[in-house]
Image: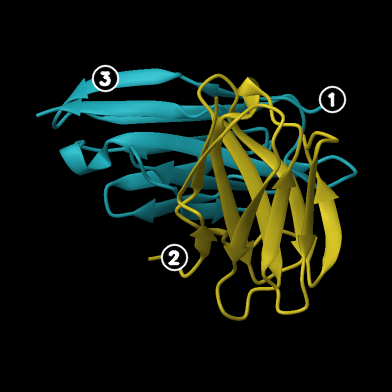
Chain colours: A yellow, B cyan
């Protein structure tokens, strides 16, 4: 158990819909990272937040947005969903700002878009 | 832009054989991390390498960072079925501190 929790575990929805994925970091970690893992694209970094502020941006689509709240939990919002958005979404947390510390991954949310 | 290639993409070995995966970068890396993901699981941190020529060992696993800090390798001696999974190298680079995972090497071990 990494100490990072993600909900829900599974999500099935239809194209065009909007969903919210939630992540609670390990106690004391200020950084939260979001990743998308699909079979053809591998593990893609989406975005990082540190103590409520966006720190680094990766391959995140404009239809996707994220935020980190004062209690440090984070949400990833995916809108206008397409079939290609079906993937495993991981959240990770670390103590540091630069991301050079160990990242602890949550169990992931499997999103299926029908 | 910075490109890191991880090879091989797949490797199947008999239990007891050795295994090596490589990450090669077109530019100098400040550091590199290695993660392992078991089938159906999430990535788990293995190690971070920072210094030129650094070598670190964890039991049967040996990690190396090249002298020029452009390549890294993970070597497993005498593989076991518990070594099955995908091994990723991870680095941070570019002006936006974008984290990049290599494509990973999927290791399967035949008992």
Mark toward the start of the polypeptide (3 vs 1): 1
Spatial distance from mark 2 to mark 3, Cα to Cα?
29 Å
The C terminus of chain A - image quarter: top right
Residue depicted at 50% across the width and 23% down the height: A39
> Where residue B32 sits in the image (x, y, percent)?
62, 45
Residue depicted at 28% across the width and 54% down the height: B59
Above or below, A44 against B1 in this view is below
Q: Which mark is residue B80?
A: none
- The answer to whether the residue labelled 2 contacts the one labelled 1, judged by CB atoms less than 8 Å apart, is no
Q: Which residue is mark 1?
A: B1
Residue depicted at 75% across the width and 54% down the height: A48
Spatial distance from mark 2 to mark 1, Cα to Cα?
33 Å
Disc 3 residue crowd, few under 14, some 14–19, many 20+, Cα 10 Å: few
Q: Please, what secondary structure does the residue beneath circle 3 have?
A: strand
Disc 1: which chain? B
Q: Which mark is residue A2?
A: 2
> Where residue B35 sits in the image (x, y, percent)?
48, 46
Observer-nearest of B26 and B81: B81
Observer-nearest of B73 and A76: A76
Disc 2: which chain? A
The N terminus of chain A - image quarter: bottom left
Most distant residue in the right direction: B95
Q: Is residue A96 left or right of residue B13?
A: right
Numbered disc in front, either 2 or 3: 2
Question: In this view of the protein, can residue B80 be seen by the observer?
Answer: no
Q: Which residue is mark 3?
A: B12
Disc 1 residue crowd, few under 14, some 14–19, many 20+, Cα 10 Å: few
């Amino acid at each position: 158990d990494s100490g990072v929790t993600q909900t829900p575990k599974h999500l099935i929805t239809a194209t065009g819909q909007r969903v919210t994925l939630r992540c609670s970091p390990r106690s004391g970690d200020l950084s939260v990272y979001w990743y998308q893992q699909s079979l053809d694209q591998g593990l893609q970094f989406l975005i990082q937040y540190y103590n409520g502020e966006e720190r680094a941006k990766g391959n995140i689509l404009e239809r996707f947005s994220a935020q980190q709240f004062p209690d440090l939990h984070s949400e990833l919002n995916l809108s206008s969903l397409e079939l290609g958005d079906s993937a495993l979404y991981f959240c990770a947390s670390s103590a540091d700002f630069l991301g050079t510390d160990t990242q602890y991954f949550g169990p992931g949310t499997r999103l299926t878009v029908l | 832009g910075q490109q890191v290639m991880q090879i091989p993409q797949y490797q199947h070995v008999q239990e007891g054989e050795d295994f090596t995966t490589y990450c090669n970068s077109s530019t100098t890396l400040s550091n590199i991390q290695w993660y392992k993901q078991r089938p159906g699981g999430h990535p788990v941190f293995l190690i971070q390498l920072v210094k030129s020529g650094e070598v670190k060992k964890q039991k049967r696993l040996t990690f190396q960072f090249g002298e020029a800090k452009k390549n890294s390798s993970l070597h497993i001696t005498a593989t076991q079925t518990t070594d099955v999974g995908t091994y990723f190298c991870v680095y941070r680079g570019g002006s936006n501190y974008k984290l990049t995972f290599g494509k990973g090497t999927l290791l399967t071990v035949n008992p």
